[in-house]
């Protein structure tokens, strides 16, 4: 189970096992669902939206990876510059 396991009742544990709902799915609902009274819900529409966001994030991560990583420089609260990290760097420090 996940972060919620300290608050799980025996009843919930039994129902999760009976219904084949792993703790990771409960974590997903608690992280991305919306509260309606005392129930946290994550419906099909919410899941489709979340899937699109994850796909967009994946695409962005792959672009950053192609550049070998990125760096953004900040000074005094202002973003000064951004640059791609070289793909092959020696381990200089």
Image: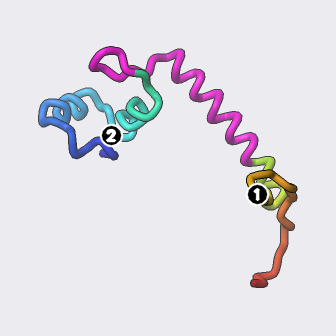
Q: Is residue 70 visible to the viewer in this orientation of the structure?
A: no
Q: Choose between 84 and 52: the one closer to the eye.
A: 84
- In the rendered image, residue 3, in percent from the top left (x then y), is placed at 33, 46
Query: Quarter-wise, where is residue 16 in the image?
Result: top left
The answer to whether 60 appears left or right of 26 in the picture is right
Query: Does label 1 or label 2 sit earlier along the sequence?
Result: 2
**Residue 1 visible (yes or no):** yes
Q: Residue 59 lies in what quarter of the image?
A: top right
Which residue occupies 80% across, 59% down? 73
| Residue 29 against residue 63 in the figure, above or below | above
Q: Nearer the viewer, residue 74 or 3?
A: 74
Magenta-highlighted residues:
35-61
In the rendered image, the residue lying farthest to the bottom is: 92
Please tell me which residue is depicted at 38% across the width and 38% down the height of the picture: 27
Identify the residue shown where x is 57% and y is 21%. 48
Residue 60 falls inside the magenta stretch: yes
Name of the residue lying farthest toward the left? 10
Tag shown at residue 26:
none
Quadrant (top left/top right/bottom left/bottom right) for the C terminus: bottom right
Give the crowd class for mark 2: few <14, some 14-19, many >=20 residues within 10 Å.
some
Residue designated by label 1: 76
- Residue 63: x, y in percent? 80, 47
Q: What is the number of callouts on the image?
A: 2
Crowd around label 1: few <14 · some 14–19 · many ≥20 (10 Å): few
The main secondary structure of the magenta stretch is helix
- In this figure, which residue is indicated by the disc labeled 2? 23
Residue 77 within the segment the image draws in magenta:
no
Is residue 83 shown left or right of residue 45?
right
User: Whole-percent x and y of residue 32?
Assistant: 47, 30
> How is this picture coloured?
rainbow
């Amino acid at each position: 189970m996940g972060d919620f396991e300290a608050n799980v009742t025996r009843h919930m544990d039994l129902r999760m096992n009976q219904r084949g709902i792993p703790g990771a799915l409960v974590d997903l609902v608690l992280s991305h669902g919306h509260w309606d009274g005392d129930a946290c819900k994550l419906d099909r529409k919410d899941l489709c939206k979340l899937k699109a966001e994850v796909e967009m994030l994946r695409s962005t991560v792959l672009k950053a990876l192609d550049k070998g990583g990125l760096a953004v420089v900040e000074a005094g609260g202002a973003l000064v510059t951004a640059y791609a990290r070289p793909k092959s760097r020696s381990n200089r420090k």
